Image: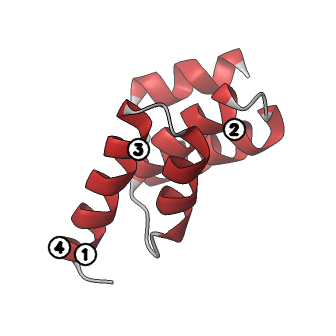
Amino acid sequence: MSYVDTLRQWDKAVTCADRQEWSEALSIFLSIQEPNSKIYFDIGCLHLLNQDLDDAEKAFDCSIRKDEHLAVAFFQRGLT
């Protein structure tokens, strides 16, 4: 998946999230082949909204592994 395709998928997912279509947004985020730290963070937040703490924790762990300076991922990981 090219960078442009990733951005398009991200934009579609964020649009769904803005409309509170959580499951559709999550599905789109999960379809991104090489998610970056911020996409993993978004995935974790959507799992939290669905009360799926185990998957949220895994997504935040992936986010932290991709970017150890993303403080908000550490914070959210601590809350789960």
Q: N-terminal of the two: label 4 or label 2?
A: 4
Q: Can you tell which mark lies on residue 54?
A: none
Q: N-terminal of the two: label 3 or label 2?
A: 3
For marks 3 and 2, give the CA distance.
19 Å
Tell me residue 48's x, y (percent).
Answer: 67, 28
* Circle 1: residue type: Asp
Which residue does the numbered mark 2 point to in the structure image?
A: 56
* Circle 4: residue type: Val
Neighbour tally class for label 2: few under 14, some 14-19, many 20 plus, Cα within 10 Å:
many
* Circle 2: residue type: Ala
For marks 1 and 4, give the CA distance.
4 Å
Say if residue 69 shows up in the picture: no
For marks 4 and 2, give the CA distance.
26 Å
Question: Against 78, is 8 above or below?
Answer: below
Per the image, label 4 sits on a secondary structure element best described as: helix
Q: N-terminal of the two: label 1 or label 2?
A: 1
For marks 3 and 1, give the CA distance.
17 Å
Contact flag, marks 3 and 2 (Cβ < 8 Å): no
Question: Against 42, is 76 above or below?
Answer: above
**Residue drawn at (71%, 46%), measured in percent from left and top?**
58
Contact flag, marks 1 and 4 (Cβ < 8 Å): yes
**Residue drawn at (49%, 49%), measured in percent from left and top?**
25
Where's the N terminus, which quadrant?
Answer: bottom left
**Residue drawn at (17%, 73%), measured in percent from left and top?**
4
Which residue does the numbered mark 3 point to in the structure image?
A: 16
Which residue does the numbered mark 4 point to in the structure image?
A: 4
Q: Can you tell which mark lies on residue 5?
A: 1
